[in-house]
Amino acid sequence: MRSFCFVLLASLAAQPVYANDAFERLKAKYKALQDGQATLPSLTESALSPKAAANNTQLISRPEDLSGTIPAGEELILGVQLGKLVLGQVFGFKTEVGAKLSLFDMTQAFDFAIETDFDNESASGWIRNPNNTFTLSHLEDGTWSVTTNGRSSIISAEKIDLEDDFYIELGLYEKWFDVNFNADYGTLTLKTQSNRPLPIEEKLAREQRAKNTYRTRNEARAPLQKHDYQPISKPLLDIQASVNASESSDTSHNISVLGSNDLAYFNTQYYFAINDENEVNSARLSGSRYSNDADLLGFLNATTIEFGDIRSTQINPLQKNNTFLGARFSNTPLSYNGGNSINLIGNIQAGWDVEVYRNQLLLTSQFNVTDGQYEFQNLPLVFGYNEIELVFYGPQGQVNRENRSYYVSSTGQSAGEFVYDISFVDEGERLFDQNTLNDSDKNGLSTLIRADYGVTDWWSLSIGSQIHHEQGFEQYDQQSFGSDISLFGEALLSIDSLEQDNGDYERRYQVDTSLWDQSLSFIHRENQRTNRDDGDINSFESQELRLSGAIPSLKLSYQQSIEQITPDNEEEYLRFTNQIGTSIGNSYFSNRFSWVDRDEGETTGDWQVQRYLNDFFWRFGNDYTLSPDFDIQSFFTEISGDMSDNTSGRVRWIYDLENDASETTLIASWQPNEFSLTSNFSYNDRTGWRASLLGRVGIGLTQNNSTFFTRMPVSSQGTLSTRVFLDNNRNGRFDLGDRPLSNVEVETLQSYRKATTNSQGVAVLTALPSYQQTDIDIDLRQLDDPYLIRADQGVSIAPRPGSVQTLDIPVVPSLEIEGYVKELQQNGNLANKARVPVLLKDASGTVIKEVTSEFDGYFLITEIVPKAYTLEIDPVYLRNFKFQQGTQIPLTGAESGILAEQNLILRKSFGVHGYSAQLASFSRLESLRGYWRILTKRLPEITQYRYFYNQTAAGYQLYVGFSEDNQEANSLCTLLTENGVDCAVTGITRR
């Protein structure tokens, strides 16, 4: 036993993740054995103190020293590994030449269909596939007969032991399972290599192929709590105000408000900006409703309804959609659904800049957004994984980031899937901006329709049309066609065409694939456009080869392309573009340049270096021309950082060599959680000084109607208000008598947002990505009571933009259950039973917790939410190992604290020889029972005896009474015979 404890302790040292309280008690007992103590510590009391545990670890040898120290006959528990996959644990014994392992555990680990029959000392089933049958039987001479893969063989008796299971030498498993094993007794692992794919590997491959094309690295698992639209909801407001002054102009001010709330079961978004003349210079109003379940508009199964100032339908990726007055409905999935390009559109405060990065490379940017909305259309995606990062820069130095993931490998539509998108718009018009957009040649009603259809799982088609309903339009009606074809999952072929009634067109043919984990694309473009002023027709054609990817060993990301361009009536030329980004030490370097093969040839580019210097971030770079003449146009340097928890600063200097002018900018920002206030002062050699002060705040209401303030945007992204409370009456609701819990950290696991509850138990998490499902987790470690646990089973949310979702999380004192599994033996004694699975089931029969009894039969179940449960031994285990029954312990839900001595008892059938009165035999069980009822009415005195039956080939044989001697059976037969009933005393063995 001491060496067995030693094995377990070494395994614990090698794999700390398996440490638990039971192992700490085991270490305490082992230390007592080493020290020669007469009285050993209890295995059911609490674990060692940290100090004692630390001292105890000094006794443990390194795992690799164990290979020669485990004597034959010692028990083993090995973890079966297949690559990075852990298949399970198997029990066995060390032998002189290796190990003998449990047949039941091995078949469970590899998921092979083999059943054991201990009564007949045999096992049967199949391995890998039903045609490869397997049988194992014990012969009279002690040897074993094995049939596998159609071949029979005799195995010597010493290679297989039959105790509570079949324990078989490791080498036989290798032969039968067609695998190779490497047993590491230092780490107690059994590493597996299969000569051909195992069923469990094929199952994982099938699951991988069935995954959606949009894959996240960390998917939400908890049940989704829906956030339904409301008749009217609490508003969310983002308010931004600024004051500006300069040497050459008067002081000015402006304010903008971006708001959102539910109204009449729709979400309403509104935006307006007021200039220094107190005039509204921009405004927007829209209503919308979205559904991930596609249950809007009845049989239309729409996911989207929009009206007001909306984005019109994009009938083809080659067409740009714009914001007009109108209405739109569609069943297009709200998340990415395939294709090699995306549109990024969202709300933003005026004056902000936006940059878009793909796999750490800058793709494009927009500066000084003025209308409260950013948009990037037809952003290219590479084949495979795409990490898109949006970086938002405020006018006074604020920086916000948003990340999205896309995976390109297929068309995104399954066979038979139909997707539509329809809008009716008044082009050139908005609800409040008619005067600024009014142009009689471009105004008027039009309908835009797009329809996509999955012909097969690998081929989809798309058609679209835009129809104008009024005369006098400059634009022509348009028709579009598109097709996506997945080439065996290794490449994606895309065809897009946009045709106008006047003969103008735009077409694109693209193939995307990957080569050695690098993305490769070939794109052919061609178009024809008619000049509306003079009627001239201009055409354009290009072919581009693009390669992009990353080299992790060099910490380098890159994209390069070579493009042949043929303009109308001009000579064709080549354009080569290269972008790289790499980490060099603690610095990040990026460079991009473009070379054009025409005229004298022109090469231009820009580069920058950025790194952290202690707590500050530094950037330096410049723009340059390499040919036809070398020239440096400008360079800049910038340093920024936090001066305290809530304040940050930035200094930027730009020098323009062409104009011999420089500009210096000083930015200071105060950003507590509730708001942000930023000052900006700059001086330019030519234009003089400028100064500004900007404040921004997001405002909303929690579930208890308390106002919250935040510096993060709330009207354009999701917001969660979470209340954590001690549920004293355990009803799962916050009501009278429950206590809010402060200082609890709340986290959205998939969107990486955190907040801490206040004195009212409320934490507000802002800027949550729209419709991205995320689990909600809480951290109770800062509370004084270490036994408090979350009462629910967890929940996830899919935040709606512009709305506050509320969530109450109850917390209760936890319950712990400990005890022993014992086997009732035939002599009446109870023996501790190891490796028995113990289940904790709720009232519906669902398994809530499962543990396995330790080497001494001890089990411990922790972190249990108090409610009605049943504690029992796994019925599958009882059936497989031929146990007749196991006890069950019901729990009412009123229990709390630690429930000790919750012992579970199991037993096998015992054979007892005795005597019974044998009566008649019946062909049907119903006849037997009817006969017994008639007999007891005739002879009531025999009801003191129990009847039973035995099923045979001839039918059902009736017996009455059972005792170990024949006296009772003789008396009963005498009584029955005297009353004309045939009876015979028969010896019988019962279990």
Image: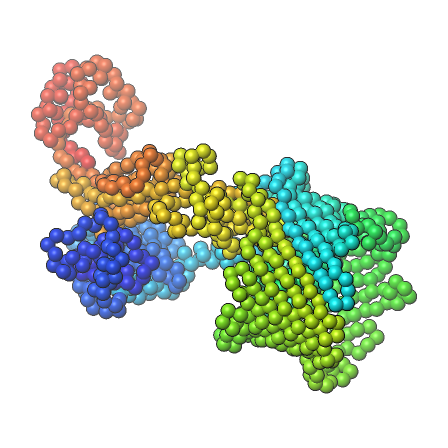
Query: Residue 58's spot in the image, x, y percent?
Result: 23, 65
Is 88 placed above or below 740 here?
Answer: below
Q: Position of residue 319 (x, y in %)?
A: 74, 58
Residue in the foreground of this view, choosing between 37 and 69:
37
Tell me where residue 504 appears, x and y as whole percent. 82, 62
Image quadrant assignment for residue 846: top left
The residue that appears at 82% across and 54% down in the rendered structure is 436
User: In screen coordinates, is 259 left or right of 219?
Assistant: right
* Screen quadrant of the C terminus: top left
Left or right position of 663 against 465: left
Residue 293 seen by the camera: yes
Residue positioned 53% across, 57% down in the render: 216
Q: Is residue 459 visible?
A: no
Q: How many marks?
A: 0
Q: Is residue 919 above or below residue 904?
A: above
Q: Is residue 621 left or right of residue 744?
A: right
Residue 730, above or below 275:
above
Q: Quadrant of the N terminus?
A: bottom left
Q: Which residue: 30% across, 56% down?
A: 19
Report whether 801 appears left or right of 63. right
Q: Residue at x 79, y 73 (%)?
A: 567
Residue 701 image position (x, y, % from top left): 58, 43
The residue sitting at the bottom extreme is 629
